[in-house]
Structures are given as structure tokens and as C-alpha cells.
Amino acid sequence: MKIVTIKSILLFLTILFLAFSFSIQVMTFSPLPALAPYVLLASVFLLTLYQRPSSFKLRWSPHHRITFLIILYLVSLFFNTGWQTIFSFINLYQGVSAIFVFGLPVMFFVYFRSFATNQEFRAVFSAMLLAGLVSGSFYVYDSYSMMVQGQVSEYNISVMKYIEMRSLWEGPQNVARITPFGRSHGLLEKHTVSAAWIVLGCFGALTLLPKRKPIKRMTIVLIFSLILLIALNVTSIALFVFVVLLMEYRGHSILYGAPSKRIVNLLLTIITGLVLVGSLYYLLPDSIGVHLGASIVKIMDYQVDLVSGNLKHVEHSYFGSLIRSFISYPDDVSKIFPLGVLIGDGFSTFGFSKGGDYGIVESLHRFGVPLFFAILIGLMSLIRCAFKQIYRKGQKQSPEINYLWFAGSATLYIVLADVHYSIWCMKSILPIIFINLAIFDRYLYSPTQRRLLRHSQLIRSPMSHYNKIKS
């Protein structure tokens, strides 16, 4: 078997272990399976070194913004973890754990920036598709079991036992995961992570499918939309719809009064989706369709009331409480760790409590104001540049454009998810961000793309080019 094929298989397994390492941890009742993706990735590095030792070197982009951003991130990680460990604000185990969880994912950036081939990228996206389907299938099954039948699976009970065993919090744990007739949390550690892998699976499938096959792409969108609807993660549904509308169907063209074929495809997708949902509702037995439909409507109504602030036991709407959290940020920092405004409170248990409903505020506490806005503005700038390049290419097919489509879509979803729950800091999601950064750094600012950009600028302004030559 060729080394290239072996590496593709290893990367395929790396992504699967990345997605399901938490489930394996629960089954083995050990945190060690979380290291499996990095062992596999290290094996890929060694095979690359064996395959071409003379060319085994890092190829840094001439455009240093992404590299500089990653260096700032690593400096923040090592500096905050270091001083907190030295002065016993966190113990040695917590410090080492923070370095592993938040530092090792940079390995994905290094490999996919410098060495990954098209075959290996396709293996990665195929693994994401498989992981999304597995996560989605369990989510659908578990949602029916919990919401309709009121049955809590043995797996969810094992998850709660594992979380209690690993938790540093001595108080009572959130028991929503094992509450009959409640929402399912899916296969992974949180419902947001389970839903995120469903979304990543959809994006992986769309990246592999040619753009000239709109029916197949529409089918993929419908299948994963139906899975998310049954899963009832409202935030994920809203973000998925927004990102697909923007990146897949170019919904922004409506604003310019120029509906394209993609808008027609969007309308066709919506109509087909409504017909599909209605058909399933009436074709399924009443014991399933009616109860499941009633559960979906009930939870959707609750989420709408929560956002609008119509619940009697909730004083403010969700967005009102989010604004209040931003307003109280200076006071919270001054009470907990005043220097956190500049350097953040780090990546471990020190400082502001993490894991609440306002992920963007928690990220602000974690990074500090300068680094938070540097990362946020940097990521949004990369998404914007990728979107412009994809739009400029139109229907032209190339692996690089497809990879940029994935990186832009997945990064936009993860960034927007921070408005509610932070998922970027999850062990299975953070490496995906670094893969996306590698794609941006490799294809967005490659010498070929810069030459094409300069060429397109000359075409737009031939007189200025002529005057420049003449002068």
C-alpha cells in the first residue's frame, strides 16, 4: 500500500477519533482516548518525513497575519497557564491539561498548511461526513426516545457518571441530559457539539460534491436540516440556515435585486423541505408523528418565549441578558482579576466561570480585550476574503475554492455560535478551526491567487495600468 494512501487512512481515522473521542472516553471511563487523534497525526508527520525527508520543512505564507495571530494565541496560552501554575492558582494537572487541550490543535495547522494533499483533504471531509451522519443518527434516535417515550438511555447515564467523575465542580451537576421528556444532548459532551458535528458533516458533504449538481446538494441540505430540526437545537438550526443561505445560496444577492439560479434553488429547497416535513408528519404512525410533532412545537414555543422574554420566571429576554452581561464585564473583571482586561484569565479554571449561556462574554474574559478583538476581526476578515474569492470564481470548479468554501462556512458557524454557547474551545472543534486557518493561509494568500487578483485589477483599470507604464 502506498504511503499516500496510508496517510489518507490515518487522517480519516484522526477526524473520526477527534469527533468521537468523548464517547470513547465515556465507554472506557478514561480521558486518555482524547490523545488518540494526536498520536495518529504524529504518525502522519513521521510518514511524511520518511516519504520526503529533503522537503520536510514548514512553508510559511508570505502573508503573516494568520501566523502572527496563532503566535499571539500561543503566547497567551503559555503565559497565562504558566503564571497561574507557578503561583498555585491552578494545579499542575490543570496546567498541563490546558496546554494539551488548547496547544496541541496547532499541529493540525502545521500539517495542513505545509503538507496535506488533495487526497488527504478529501479523506478529512469524508470523515466529517461520516461523523456527522453518525452523530445525527444517534441524535434522532435519542430525541425520539427521550421526548416521545420518556426513556433515558444507558449511554446518557454513563455520560453523567463520567462527567461527575471528571468534574472539578463539587456542587450538583446539570441533569438535563438524563431528564425524561427533555431534549436530547446527542452523542457528544454537549448538545451544541453534537449539533456542530452534524453541521460539519453537511459542510463536508457539500465540499465533496460538485457545484454543477444542485439536486444532490439540495438533498444533502434537506437531510441535515431535518436531522437538526428533530434534534431541536434551536441555535444550531438558526445558524445553519443563515450560513447555508449566505454561503451555499448566495442570499446576499437578493439585497442587490439580482436573484440568481441559486435563489431559485433556495426556494425549491424550502418548498421541498416543507413538503417532506408535512409528509413525514402524516405518514408516520400517530404514536410517533403526533407526539414528536407536539414535542417539537412545544420546545420551539419555549425557545421563542425565552428569546423574547415572555416567560414569567425570566426577568429579561436572552438578548437583553446578553447586553447586561457585556455591561457588567468591567465590574466582573475588576472583582475577579483586573489584569484580565489586558491579558485575559486564561484557559483553565481560573477566573470567570465558563460554560454558561453567553459564550461571547466568556471568550472576552478568556482572551482579554486586545486579543479577543484581534481574533474576532481577523477571523471575520478571513471569512470575508474567502467569500469574495468564491464569489469571483462563480461556477468554476477547483479543489482550492471548495476548501475555501468549507473553511469560510465552518468558521462563520463557529464564530456566530459564540453568541450563545462557546463551541470553539471544545476538544473536537478547536482542531477544525486550525484546519480552516491552514486552508485560509494556504489558498487565500497563495502566490497564484495574488497574481490572479493583480491580473483582475489590471483588467478593471487598463488606463491606470497604461499610464503607469507610460510614466
Image: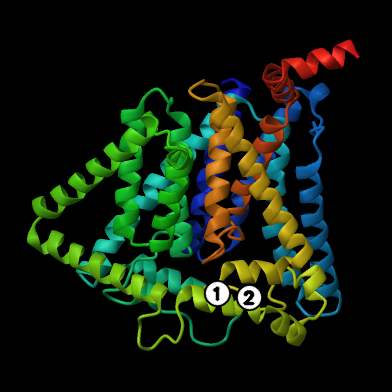
- Secondary structure of residue under mark 1: helix
Indicate whether 181 appears above or below 371: below
Question: Could you tell me which quadrant the C terminus lies in?
Answer: top right
Q: Which residue is mark 2?
A: 326
Relative placement, left or right, of 84 versus 27 is right
Please tell me which residue is depicted at 39% across the width and 56% down the height of the picture.
237
Residue 413, percent from left and from top: 52, 51
* Residue situated in front as seen by the camera: 375 or 385: 385
Q: How is the image coloured?
A: rainbow
Residue 207, percent from left and from top: 48, 33
Q: Indicate the amino acid at tag 1.
A: Leu
Indicate whether 1 appears above or below 91: above
Please tell me which residue is depicted at 23% across the width and 73% down the height of the picture.
150
Please tell me which residue is depicted at 71% across the width and 78% down the height of the picture.
351
- Secondary structure of residue under mark 2: helix
Q: Which mark is residue 322?
A: 1
Q: Quadrant of residue 291?
A: bottom left
Residue 417, percent from left and from top: 52, 59
